[in-house]
């Protein structure tokens, strides 16, 4: 064995552990590189001596690195603080303490004059926070670890549609934060397909650390989520067409609502808003939020759902026609 071969193997070991932390043990590396256990142990000893990796329950992960101090301009420091504060407020318990600690370190590293400028500027910028559904930070952390290590998970899930708990076995593919809540994207063995699970509705869970599932090589979390309007990314893509009145047309046209959106301007000032999504049923409440200034043209089932909701609202308020405002 040459020094070049050993150095190349050390780099490859680091790359493997970086991509899949806490998933490789000495036996796995021995089989991967087709060398003896003694050779792998010598490599590990070198990497540990360099402070690059650490071992926990026989598995290897990267050691925490202490980064060299850096400098920020006032706009950069303000941007970091605003972004951190905003995300901490939205993400809830998952990153709240971690972000607070990171922001304190940034504040301590700033020169006094810049720190004073940032504090003054921050007090003059308000970022509104949406309502965030509460959940267990421990559930989030356990699921994140299971996702990285490819461990299957058993959960008791309270479905909003069924209004009753069900026991599921899932293979976690990723986590996403949308519309004020954290969701797990996972393959559900009960439903035989990829589903999303709100973390606040997981009432019990157990990570099966003794097993590992095969993560699908053709699955990309962001690409999968981009197919749907919000979270329902399964099913066949459907084109949705909504006409918006002139009063809201410019606001709709100026927003980025979906990667597939197309805007068609009409002579009367209205627009046709087109998107191609899976799970178009999720668009119902979005369309309703614009009241009579939005009209679904396609598909027919979504148009019927909006009409049914409008009829029920009229019945609830006891009006058959629009009341005259004094």
Image: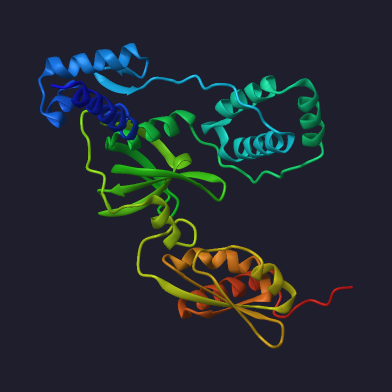
Residue 172 shown left or right of residue 34 in the figure:
right
**Quarter the N terminus occupies:** top left
Residue 257 found in image quarter: bottom right
Going by the image, does 144 lie left or right of 219?
Answer: right
Q: Which residue: 26% across, 49% down? A: 217
Judging depth in this view, the residue of 213 and 53 nearest the camera is 53
Q: Residue at x 55, y 37 (%)?
A: 134
From the top left corner, tell me how far across and down residue 23 is, in percent: 26, 29
Can I make out residue 138 in this image?
yes
Tell whether 318 sits left or right of 9.
Answer: right
> For this rendering, which residue is in front, 142 or 84?
84
Rendering coords of residue 196 (x, y %): 40, 50
Depth check: 13 or 183 in front? 13
Question: Residue drawn 47% across and 80% down?
Answer: 300
Residue farthest to the right, as pictured: 326
Work out whether 117 lies above or below 36: below
Question: Residue at left 45%, top 59%?
Answer: 226
The reply to whether residue 167 is visible in this rendering is no
Q: Quadrant of residue 42?
A: top left
Looking at the picture, how far across and down is residue 87, in whole percent?
Answer: 60, 39
Vertically, is 232 above or below 56? below
Position of the C terminus, as image quadrant, is bottom right
- Residue 167's spot in the image, x, y percent? 30, 42
């Amino acid at each position: 064995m040459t020094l070049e071969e050993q150095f190349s193997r050390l780099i490859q070991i680091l790359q493997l552990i970086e991509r899949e932390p806490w998933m490789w043990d000495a036996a796995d590396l021995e089989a991967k590189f087709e060398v003896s256990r003694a050779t792998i142990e010598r490599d590990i000893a070198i990497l540990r001596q360099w402070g690059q990796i650490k071992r926990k329950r026989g598995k290897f992960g990267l050691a925490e690195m202490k980064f060299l101090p850096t400098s920020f301009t006032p706009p950069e420091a303000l941007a970091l603080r605003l972004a951190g504060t905003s995300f901490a407020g939205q993400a809830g318990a998952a990153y709240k303490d971690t972000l607070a600690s990171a922001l304190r370190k940034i504040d301590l590293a700033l020169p006094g004059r810049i720190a004073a400028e940032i504090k003054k500027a921050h007090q003059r910028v308000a970022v509104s926070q949406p309502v965030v559904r509460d959940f267990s930070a421990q559930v989030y952390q356990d699921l994140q670890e299971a996702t990285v290590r490819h461990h299957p998970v058993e959960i008791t899930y309270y479905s909003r549609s069924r209004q009753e708990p069900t026991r599921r076995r899932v293979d976690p593919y990723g986590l996403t934060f949308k519309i004020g809540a954290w969701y797990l994207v996972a393959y559900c063995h009960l439903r035989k397909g990829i589903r999303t699970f709100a973390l606040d509705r997981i009432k019990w869970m157990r990570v099966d650390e003794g097993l590992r599932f095969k993560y699908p090589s053709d699955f990309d979390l962001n690409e999968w989520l981009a197919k749907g309007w919000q979270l329902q990314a399964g099913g066949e893509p459907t084109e949705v067409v909504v006409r918006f009145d002139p009063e809201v047309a410019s606001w709709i046209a100026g927003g980025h609502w979906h990667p597939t959106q197309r805007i068609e301007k009409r002579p009367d000032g209205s627009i046709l808003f087109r998107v191609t999504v899976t799970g178009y049923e999720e668009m119902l409440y979005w369309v309703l939020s614009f009241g009579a200034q939005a009209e679904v043209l396609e598909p027919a089932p979504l148009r019927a759902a909006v009409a049914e909701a409008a009829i029920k609202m009229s019945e609830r308020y006891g009006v058959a026609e629009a009341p005259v405002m004094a």
